[in-house]
Structure formats: structure tokens, C-alpha cells
Image: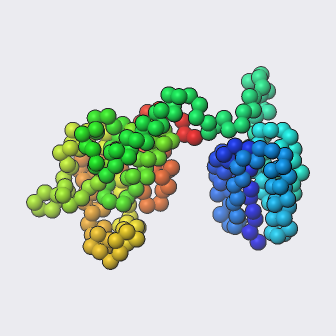
Amino acid sequence: MPRTAFFISDGTGITAESLGRSLLAQFEDVEIRMLTKPYIDTLDKAHSLVEIIEATAVRDGEQPIIIDTIVDEAVRAVIREAIGFKVDIFSTFLKPLEEELGTHSSYSVGRTHSIGRDDVYMDRIHSVHFALDNDDGARTHQYDKADIILIGVSRCGKTPTSLYLALQFGIRAANYPLTEDDQDEDGTLKLPRVLAQHRHKLFGLTIDPRRLAAIRHERRPNSRYSSMDQCMQEVQQAEALYRQMHIPFIDTTRFSVEEISTRMIAETGLHRRFSPR
């Protein structure tokens, strides 16, 4: 029978969900239904949620897993009454940290994902705007301001990676698509002139041609653009260019955007303007 996991918070629930999913992802043989319950910040909301949790326990025939980051002690006490296996993240880790640091935590609701410092907030906004403005080779004249320039064939993951780098780390990421327009007369893919002067900022993305064809088929079914032959040719030429020009690259086929970004940062030593949220 499937189990149910509740990620509960008196804030956004992002921390509880992120940690909860990371923990539960280690149990691949167990079917787990995951539910996020944010803004459980009053006793009435807590009591109502306890009723839902207990009804779930009856339906599943198994006690639910309860992972919470609730700060308010009174609300947390209500949730503790629910039938379930409880992982209280704050009490588990904050108490030992308080003892080690010799001081009390501020116990501020939503502190992890609040706007916080104005400079960090503005860095995030500017980085996201930069990624949008410089998506798909739109404004190549701004590449001197880029921290990194992602290159690769169409639909290999350049745009989501650029936006993730901007949103999570404040990295100014531009991206440029490698197309047939960048081939010379004999059909060989060449490094575009606009990229050559920023070669030290380039990072390539590649992808399995079968996966690429499937992605492109959703956009333009039964077209040359999505054909297997076209996808194989484009990927092979892109990878050959990376090797010839000594451009670092990563295969995005089996990696999430989070993994792609963190691997890229680790390999290039990119400076993070702030820590991920």
C-alpha cells in the first residue's frame, strides 16, 4: 500500500518539502504520496490538518509520515497529537545548535525564504532579467556582462538552466543556440564570431539524440527539426565543436536542472552572489 507524507510549515513549506523529498527519494521501492501544507500558522488550521492526517491514516491503513518546520510551539504541539511518524526538523537540529552556539534561535517564521537583505533581492531580480534578456542569443552585445554563456543545440536545456542559475545563485547567465547558421560551407559547425571573444565564459550542454527528438516532437511533430537524423547530426557536431575548442560541457539527459547547475558551478568555479533558497 502507498504511504502518505505531509510536509508541514507555518511559512511557505519550501524547506520542509525540499528536505522531505530529499530524504524520501532514498526509498525507491516505496510508493509515497507527498502533500505540502504551507501556512499552518494558527491553532484552528493545525486542528483541521490533524483531522486530515488522521483520516489519511485510516484510509491508507498506515500512519502518515509528518515532516514539519513549524516554529510556533503551540501549533507544533497540536501537530504532535496527530497519528503519524514525525520528523520535526527545527526541534531536531535547532536545539543542539543552540547548545553548541550558546545562544537561542530567533525562531522567526519564514526566515529562510524571506526577501531579507535588499542587495540580495535586487541581485536576484537583475540576474533573472539578464537571463531573460539574453535568452536564445537575443542580445549578444551584452555578453561582456555575462558570468557564463551556455551554448548548445535547440531544446537541450539552456533556458531553464540559465534561469535557475539566476534565481538560485544570482549568476548572470546568457545562452546561445548552435544552429545551421553557424556552419561553414562544408557543413561543419564553427564557433560563431560573437562567441569567440568570450570563449573563456562558454559552457556547452549536450543531450542524448533520442531524448532530444522526443522533446522536439512535442513542439514540432513529424518535422525535420524533430527527426532522429537531424537530432543526431546536431548533437554530434556540437560535441565535436566542444572538444575541438576545449569548451567544457555536460550531458543534460539524465540530470535535473539543479544537478546541471551545481555541477557547472563546481567545474567552472563560478562565483555565487548568494546562496540558494
Image height of 255 relative to 91, above or below = below
Q: Please give left or right for residue 147 compared with residue 266 in the image.
A: left
Q: In which quarter of the image is the N terminus?
A: bottom right
Query: What percent of the width, then of the height, locates residue 218?
Result: 40, 71
Q: Residue at x 35, y 75 (%)?
A: 221
Residue at x 33%, y 45% (from the top left corner): 134
Where does the image place residue 102, in percent across and percent down from the top left?
77, 22
Q: Can residue 241 be seen at all in this image of the molecule?
A: yes
Residue toward you, 94 or 7: 7
Residue 250 seen in the current view: no
- Please name the residue shown 68% across and 38% down the image: 110
Is 125 on the left or on the right of 205, as rendered?
Answer: right
Q: Which of 147 and 11 is in front in this view?
A: 11
**Residue depicted at x 69% and y 55%:** 36
Q: In which quarter of the image is residue 143?
A: top left
Where is residue 87? Give x, y as percent.
Answer: 78, 48
- Tell which residue pokes out farthest to the top in this image: 102
Question: Nearest the camera: 176 or 98?
Answer: 176
Q: Where is residue 105 in the image (x, y as percent from the top left)?
A: 75, 28
| Residue projecting furthest to the bottom | 222
